[in-house]
Amino acid sequence: MGELVLSIRDLRVTFDTPLGPLEAVRGVDIDVHEGEMMGVVGESGSGKSVTFLAAMGLLPHRAKVTGSVTLNGQEMIGASNKVLRNMRGGLMSMIFQDPLSALNPVHRIGDQIVEMLKAHQPKMSDKDAANRAVELLDIVGIPQAAERAHQYPHEFSGGMRQRVVIAIAIANNPKVLIADEPTTALDVTVQAQILEVIERVQKYFGTAVVLITHDLGVIARVADRVNVMYAGRNVEKGGVDALFDHPSHPYTRGLLASLPHEGVERLTPIIGFPPNMLTPPPGCGFAPRCSHATDACLVSLPPLRAFGDLETACIRAEELVMKAGLS
Ligand SMILES: Nc1ncnc2c1ncn2[C@@H]1O[C@H](COP(=O)(O)OP(=O)(O)O)[C@@H](O)[C@H]1O
Ligand code: SF4
Ligand SMILES: [Mg+2]
């Protein structure tokens, strides 16, 4: 593994809402190393976006954030606006599900890339910035990049717009690119193309990528390591091969069983819903949906701990592996 570039430690985010405090993130630890593709997966509402919005300093003021996020060794939680502005689009950038809202409809595509380049490299000449913008469009696979740089977002398809968003995000050679459900709004063939572009960026530029998705199938295709999140916590993490080969947490097993796979006609969805984060249970958040839950699971939050070549937050992981081996 390359050097550690992004380190999230005991991150907690609580939103002040009219219904009371909502505990969106409850002690998350994630490490991202130079050049790796880190998958972050979990059902909607598990705290994936909020974790990385907190890391980028993009949460509203009514969010209380504690813990630590270091990027290249520098602390981002509580950092000044100036430090955060320098970091965003510089050392770390983030792309979102909806490529349309990320682009300014009244500015030409090329100009939007130039703007990002100049925000972080003010000494770059207009000509160099314009040339670099075309180069970036070419890198993300936009045909006739020089001509298309003069067009407006509405002249691009959804997939092409997402490519432009990626070009803007990588303009200043970030160390870390966070891609939050980057393919969810796109149709299936385009999804595969966008994943390829993201992989190309990771491989050729050595950019560490955090790929956030609710779809374990996407993770299987491109990630090196995986963080499984549930109810604002990490519940399992490890290398992608180990996690798919011998998942230790009942929630991960549930996600895997609900994936389409060969020889299985009917998929098994996980029954029930994640807990309401206004009133999270004191014990394992998965207990109400877990067929292995016992009274011990309801007492306190299971900590994430080493388990073979994985890390798991299931207190019964050993017993469950033995049971599976005997049956
Ligand atoms: N701005 C906000 N104000 C209040 N609650 C929020 C806000 N953003 C997210 N949440 C809540 O935080 C929890 C985690 O959300 P999120 O990180 O967006 O989930 P995911 O990205 O995993 O689908 C959810 O319960 C969500 O409703
Ligand atoms: S700790 Fe208990 S309830 Fe939670 S996943 Fe493990 S067995 Fe199920
Ligand atoms: Mg999200």
Image (tube, grey):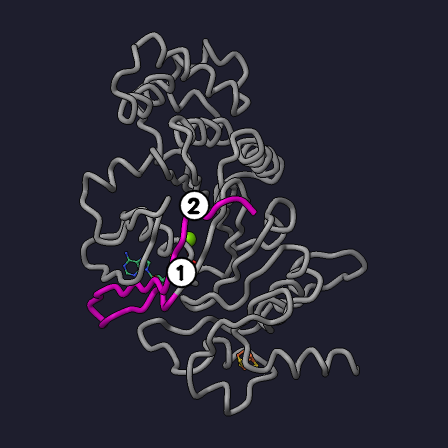
Decide which of 254, 234 is in the foreground and name it. Answer: 234
Q: Name the residue located 44 percent from the left edge and 39 percent from the top edge.
A: 177
Q: Name the residue located 69 percent from the left edge and 63 percent from the top edge.
A: 267
- Taking the image as shown, residue 114 lies to the left or right of residue 201, namely left
Q: Name the amino acid type tagged 1.
A: Gly
- Taking the image as shown, residue 301 lies to the left or right of residue 141, namely left
- Range shown magenta: 1-27
Q: Name the amino acid type tagged 2.
A: Val
Question: Do tag 2 and tag 1 residues touch (Cβ < 8 Å)?
Answer: no
Badge number at residue 118: none
- Can you tell me whether the CB of the residue at mark 2 lies under 8 Å from the nearest atom of ligand 1? no
Q: Secondary structure at mark 2?
A: strand
Check residue 67 for magenta coloring.
no
Q: Quadrant of residue 47?
A: bottom left
The residue that mark 1 highlights is 47
Decide which of 3, 296 is in the foreground and name it. Answer: 3
> Which percent across, then down, holds residue 120?
29, 26
- Can you tell me whether the CB of the residue at mark 1 lies under 8 Å from the nearest atom of ligand 1? yes
> Which percent across, then down, holds residue 31?
46, 54
Q: Name the residue located 77 percent from the left edge and 62 percent from the top edge.
A: 264
Q: Name the residue located 24 percent from the left edge and 70 percent from the top edge.
A: 21
Decide which of 273, 12 is in the foreground and name it. Answer: 12
Judge depth for marks 2 and 1 and give the one in front.
Answer: 2
For the C terminus, which image quadrant? Answer: bottom right
> Which percent across, then down, holds residue 322?
72, 81
Q: Earlier in the sequence, mark 2 or mark 1?
A: 2
Q: Quadrant of residue 5?
A: top left
Image: 124 above or below 304: above
The residue that mark 2 highlights is 5
Query: What is the magenta segment's predominant secondary structure?
Result: strand
Check residue 21 for magenta coloring.
yes
